Amino acid sequence: MTDASSTPAMPVTIHRGDYRPPEWLIPDIALDFALGIDATRVAAALSVVRHADAPVPLVLRGDGLTPAAVRVDGEVWNGWRMDGSDLIVDLGDRTAATVEVDTVVDPASNTQLSGLYASNSMLCTQCEAEGFRRITFHPDRPDVLSRYKVRMQGDKAKFPILLSNGNCVAQGEQGSDHWALWEDPWPKPSYLFALVAGDLVVNRDSFTTMSGRKVALGIWVRDGDLDRTGHAMQALKDSMKWDEEVYGREYDLDLFNIVAVSDFNMGAMENKGLNIFNTRYILADPDTATDMDYDGVEGVVAHEYFHNWSGNRVTCRDWFQLSLKEGFTVFRDQNFSADMGSPAVKRIEDVRLLRAAQFPEDAGPLAHPIRPDSYQEISNFYTATVYNKGAEIIRMMATMVGPERFRKGTDLYFDRHDGEAATCEDFVRAIEDGAGVDLTQFRRWYEQAGTPRLSLSLVDDGGQWALDVQQTVPPTPGQPDKQPMMMPLKLAAFAMDGSGAAMPEMLVTLTDATQRVALGAFAARPALSINRGFSAPVIVDYARAPGELAWLAANDDDPFARYEALQQLMLDTLVAAVSGGTPDHSVVIDAVAGTLAGRQTDPAFVAEAVLLPSEAFIGDQMVTVDPDAIRRERLALQAAIGAALEREWRAILSGAAPPATDLSRAAKGGRRLRGVALAYLAATGRDDVPALAFRIFSDADGMTERQAALATLAHGDSDERVASLDIFYQRYRDNPLVLDKWFQVQAWSLRADTVHAVKELAQHPDFTLANPNRVRALYGALTGNQAAFHQADGAGYRLIADLVIALDPKNPQTAARMIPPLGRWKRFDEGRQRLMRAELERILAQPGLSRDVTEQASKSLLG
Ligand code: B3K
Ligand code: ZN
């Protein structure tokens, strides 16, 4: 299998409307693997049953495969041919047959990390979305469900552990080899198949389900990593319990295994009974993982576990329905994490991510509905829109009907579609029927791309106040005209005059392009709390009265709304400054001071609330993004807040940090606030800051404090910067996940020479294109560093385009993920536009480009 030639560049567009049911079903599959790092022989036996009414050949998809032998019902078969990379087997007028196909794959040279590949001399698989066809010929579509029997045999010394889906039903030895036979009783699509063979150690535990069944749990890692698996195991047990309590979903096998792999294209994969994870989302101990890393482990373990029902027991009919499993499962993992920690902080983090990743996608050339209408390469559609906006769509349904009725809807969904490959429409209908609600208009969220915008104006009708709401959905590629959406909008109103008069929270369902909402009686214009809890994923325009945001930041009874008010205040100040106004920092300083007063009660919330909006988010508010002015004004505001509240920041830092082993909410919040305090203090440029940061770095008993201090130092120019980076490198050079942080903090740096530094770091002996985590740590961090990536001479763009060109032949999925930042060219000045487009054109001019990169770059160029 040669990776470069296995993905043809010819773009074929697949349309949702072209869906046809499968012509052949495959109730049973037996796979026999003779394992080898350079050559693994795969003997597949498919029991096929004709589903079409009339005779039709069996089409088996392949990617980079050559059939070594084809047999039908035990006989050598000549009635087959290749059509491109697909195998067409002519079965005459048979209605059922056993089709056997032998193939040989080379895991060691599979650098795409899709199909069967080698990572640290271990063999593992990644089949979603279309990787199974890189292992053996198969329809490889999610609506073909089969029971799998998997036999694997290999050298005992090289592959002491042999794992697949389901249960191990037999094993034995044969000379220097051993073998294992795994059977999965649950029919599943090919994308959920998994196999792992390697030298692994296990953290074993167990969970007793609500019906009293004991499930054996195992987390498999490389020798030496075992003592960093405790948090993942706890997260797994918590997830299993939560899904029983909140959704009534019980685990359905006697075994649940997780394997951690260093080289992995995404976060993790929910293969039935055998989840495969990026080590990043399994391994954590206080010395090497930050609190945020801990939360990442908990959230991703939960996400993959929850897929056992939302994704595996009920799967997707076709890949256009991806949000059916991903949006719903993200919604489930968000609520789980909220229940495990702080709901307000979790909501802030989720909304921040939505605004950072999804809103720009929805406003750019790659905008698509959560249920796309067409694609060239499905890997390009594992997007923030499908995942995170998808979760918001589910959240809106839950908000509109309330928790009990929503549960009735999801119960009905699982009952109706258990064992099936379902559609988004099936989900909406189950919520309608189970919860008793009409979602006819709401379905537009599945059809229309673009972030809706609400323009609000307050009307005073003789002391009776009302709100006029105007809704527009912007045009997006292929969708020039939009219809108004149905959405829940949570509102409250408060008198700012000290009378205490308030209109308690109300839930309004918006349906029309213009709509009037009665608010009630107020003696004077009230302060409005709008879109509380971010009840709808929209942008709100509303001209505030002077002092209104500051009042809400201090007094709103919804913590999310307090956060929003303070953010909006900061944003207004920054946008005015960037647009050439004279900024008045004092309102922001006062509001931050007021928020800081609550730091004893809820340090985690306070830390989130006082953070300035990101440079990118400030840019999103502007007609033309000016990265340099944004950086300058943001730093100026940060310095002003740092100086005005210097005493507070120093007081926060003067106490002892909570012990790193304390992972309580209060301890995590305390550490987060210390990190924020250090950043504000550093912005003042006071002489003692590098020494202070270096002391924190050196005294730190865990990674949260250590990384925060290192990141602060990395922005500056001090001797302490050089020393801390060096100490960090020497200490962690053998730990890949921590070394990623070393690359990342340098690519995040606010220094003027960051693009140059990234270019140099790409030549560092520890840098490699073979590991997606390392690529993301360096280049992904650069694209997240707005002023650096958009350096006016185009050096940042060139670096990313060079990376895409170098990485595409090895790993097209990861290469394609680096393109969207170049596609935002329309948002910048003419000079930058030209440079960005030129890089996209340079990428597209490369011969033999993958389908992944071709699709992303050509769509991005259209703007
Ligand atoms: N379902 C996988 C994603 C697979 C991506 C393939 N390109 C992880 C997840 O969302 O849980
Ligand atoms: Zn998922």
Image (cartoon, rainbow, N blue to C red):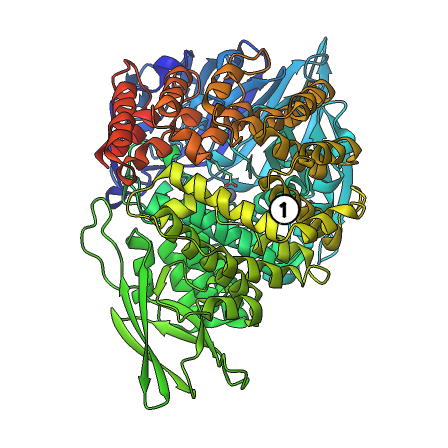
- State the image coordinates of residue 64 (x, y, percent, origin top left): 39, 16
**Front in this rendered view, residue 701 or 450:** 701
Q: Is residue 464 above or below residue 788?
A: below
Q: Is residue 720 left or right of residue 71?
A: right
Amino acid identity at mark 1: Val
Does residue 599 show up? yes
Q: Residue furthest bottom?
A: 462
Instruction: Measuring from the top left, give residue 751's x and y in whole percent.
Output: 51, 28
Q: Quadrant of residue 77?
A: top left
Q: Is residue 18 left or right of residue 386?
A: left
Q: Quadrant of the C terminus?
A: top left
> Is residue 60 in sight in this rendering?
no
Q: Nearer the viewer, residue 311 or 721?
A: 721
Query: Residue at point 53% right, 60% down?
Result: 563
In the depicted structure, whether residue 151 falls above or below residue 448: above
- Percent of width and height locating residue 155: 68, 12
Vertical order, 545 against 253 (above or below):
below
Image-based side of 239 in relation to 566, left or right: right
Left or right placement of residue 743 versus residue 706 in this view: left
Residue farthest along the left direction in this orientation: 480
Given residues 749 and 117, the one toward you in this image is: 749
The N terminus lies in quadrant = top left
Q: Look at the picture and state if 467 lies above or below 667.
A: below
Q: Nearer the viewer, residue 144 or 437?
A: 437
Q: Mark 1 — residue?
A: 676
**Does the closest atom of ligand 1 sit within 8 Å of the Cβ of label 1?**
no
At mark 1, the secondary structure is helix
Res 277 → quadrant: top right
Determine the residue positioned at 24% across, 28% down. 834
In terms of image quadrants, where is residue 455?
bottom left
Crowding at mark 1 (Cα within 10 Å: few <14, some 14-19, many 20+): many
